[in-house]
Image (cartoon, rainbow, N blue to C red):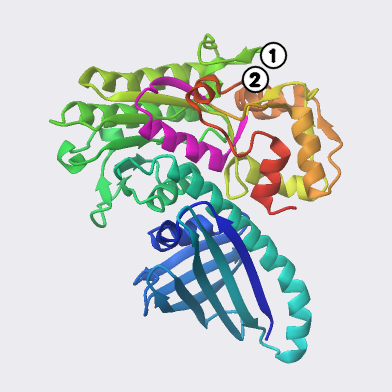
Amino acid sequence: MPVFEWRSVMPVPVEELFAYHVRPGAFERLAPPWQRLRVLEQSGGMREGGRLVVEASRGPLKRRWEAELRGYIEGRQFVDRQAKGPFAAWEHVHRFLPRDERSSELLDHVEYSLPAGSVSDAIAARLAGKQLGRLFRFRHARTRMDLERHAAWAGEPPLRVLISGASGLVGSSLAHYLTTAGHEVVKLVRRPAAGPGEVSWDPAAGRLDPAGLRGVDAVVNLAGASIASLWTPGRRKAILESRLQATGTLVDALRRMETPPRVLVSASAVGAYGSRGGEALTEESSLGEDFLAEVCRAWEAAAARAAEVGVRVVTPRFGIVMSSAGGALAKMLPAFRAGLGTRLGDGEQWWSWVDLDDLLGAVEWMLHDGELSGVVNVTSPEPVSNRDFTRILGHVLHRPAALAVPRVAVARGLGGMGREMFLASQRAVPTRLGRQGFRPCFPELEAALRYELGKE
């Protein structure tokens, strides 16, 4: 039976390393973004008798995997063993080993067998070893980064955080990031609440009962219709109104609370600046005049009203989010993997981007740093041109990326969306975050893409 091991030293005591792995959301947090995994059932946590059922998707194909939890030793170990799934046998021992007062060791020990038996096992040991290495290299890297960032706020009490837009890429990722740090997350949902971790609302009708928000320490507002579609007149209206309705409903509820939360982090975007060529755009730069800039101006103004009742309001202007789990990068990958990576126009327009994990760390910083309010750029300190983005992504994927789409074709084919999302030039830099001491783990695009795609 093949055996695989991966071990790393972690910069926290063993108790915190263990706690991170057994908190809610740990499985989802440590699932690599290039895998399509959905938790169907989870009960009993990581303790003896716990159960985990996951669905893995690859294109139209779906496969179910069921695991039983056993071998639990408080602070030191737990084991997941396949009950049903693609392997003849699978047992994964998670071990947490103390080193000293400030560090520990994470050891993942996996024994597995394929259905065909010993002949296929000999082949699998060579082929599967590479994929397991890719998986656990990512898991250990994410674990280390999360623990280092959480440790910066270890002296602060845990928060009860309300999230709107929690089903989206950023919102769902943020929920798991915060719960593995020991915070409690409450999600706003547009259906009847399923339990204490949810609060029902209807932003289109302006309905949100302030009583349901009692005890919330912080709010993260991410709700809004996707801008990744053709901007028909109806779609433009939905993009603007969905943001104003959600933010207005939320702020009105906060203003009616006897004790409102300490902080509201309400999303915006670097589209607020309009297209500005090569100008370095800081939080002090003026706003643009196009459609996205007008949306951001109104969106930010709606959130700012919460400051009138003493809530610290932060409006992060997010760059293009890099994650292979969804968003812009995931939409680009099929073409680039097929060798059809394409420069847009002359490729000289600046793209301000941010790795998803750096975005999550920035939001965590905003929740805790009481000196931070107002507009905050959440981007890499090293934006790139579309030409360089195309070249770097092709290089990481080992695929040619030499095609180009004329500017006029992008503008005519995609209309306003093409002009303002793909051809606009925004060289935004995170001046205020850097001044406060926040340091991204991925300032350079190539390193971020290799991390997100599991490429060495």
Q: Quadrant of residue 312?
A: top left
Q: Is residue 446 left or right of residue 185?
A: right
At mark 2, the secondary structure is strand
Q: Quadrant of residue 24?
A: bottom left
Q: Amino acid at mark 1?
A: Gly
Q: Amino acid at mark 2?
A: Arg
Q: Quadrant of the N terminus?
A: bottom right
| Mark 1 neighbour class, 10 Å CA radius: few under 14, some 14 to 19, many 20 or more | few
Distance from disc 2 to disc 1, alpha carbons, whole Å, reads 8 Å
* Rendering coords of residue 429 (x, y %): 60, 21
Q: Which residue is mark 2?
A: 427
Magenta range:
353-377
Residue 84 visible somewhere in the drawing: yes
Q: Earlier in the sequence, mark 2 or mark 1?
A: 1
Q: Is residue 130 above or below residue 408?
A: below
Q: Quadrant of residue 219?
A: top left
Q: Which residue is mark 1?
A: 277
Residue 340 visible somewhere in the drawing: no
Label 1 near label 2: C-beta < 8 Å?
yes
Q: In the displayed image of the protein, which residue is found farthest to the front?
A: 100
Q: In the displayed image of the protein, which residue is found farthest to the top?
A: 286
Foreground residue among 383 and 256: 383
Q: Is residue 61 above or below residue 164?
A: below
At mark 1, the secondary structure is loop
| Mark 2 neighbour class, 10 Å CA radius: few under 14, some 14 to 19, many 20 or more | many
